[in-house]
Amino acid sequence: MSKEANLKPFRTLAVASLTTGVLMDREGFGGVHEAAEHIMGGPIWTHEFADEKLCNEMRGKVSEFAPWMPMDIPDGQWEAIGKRLIEEHGETVLCPKGDGGFRTKGPITTLVEMIGCRDDDLP
């Protein structure tokens, strides 16, 4: 399969939401989630968006194909920065599909680790 076959357009502000941690896409979280799963190459459960390691990996992947994407947003500036991103780079950005290598643990294991319970705490 060609490299181009793995490219998919996503809304610029959905991808910016991944790098900044600020929901910038007015279409909501669904597009952000879809972009994340494509870029990382596999399913991501909602709670895993709170995993700092995963978020840093996503930022790194995005910076490889969109080095102009912001990594943070000063307080109250998301709308102005979003408008500038669209003016300078367009409504969408082509994103390569990841290889899924980020997934080293199952989503239930990551949930258990994040909430801090032990296996013997589970029913």
Image (cartoon, helix red, strand yellow):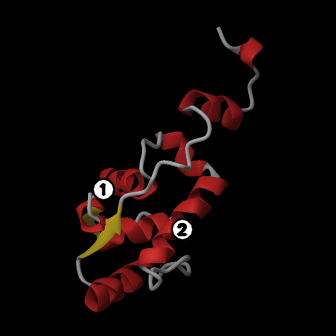
Q: Residue at x 45, y 54 (%)?
A: 40
In the image, is residue 22 above or below residue 84? above
* Residue that appears at 76% across and 21% down: 118
Between residues 88 and 94, which one lies in front from this camera angle? 94
Identity of the residue furthest to the top in this view: 123
Above or below — where is 18 with respect to 73?
above
Report the number of discs. 2
Q: Which residue is farthest front?
A: 1
Quadrant of the image for the C terminus? top right
Residue 58, numbered circle? none
Q: Nearer the viewer, residue 49 or 106?
A: 106
Residue at 36% over, 58% down: 97
Q: Which quadrant of the rendered structure holds the N terminus?
A: bottom left
* Image spot of residue 9 (x, y percent): 24, 67
Specify the label residue 59 is tagged with: 2
Left or right of 123 in this view: 58: left
Residue 94 falls left or right of residue 50:
left
Question: Regarding mark 1 in the picture, which secondary structure is present there?
Answer: helix
Q: Amino acid at mark 2?
A: Arg
Front: mark 2 or 1? 2
Circle number at residue 31: 1
> Which element carries disc 2, helix, strand or loop?
helix
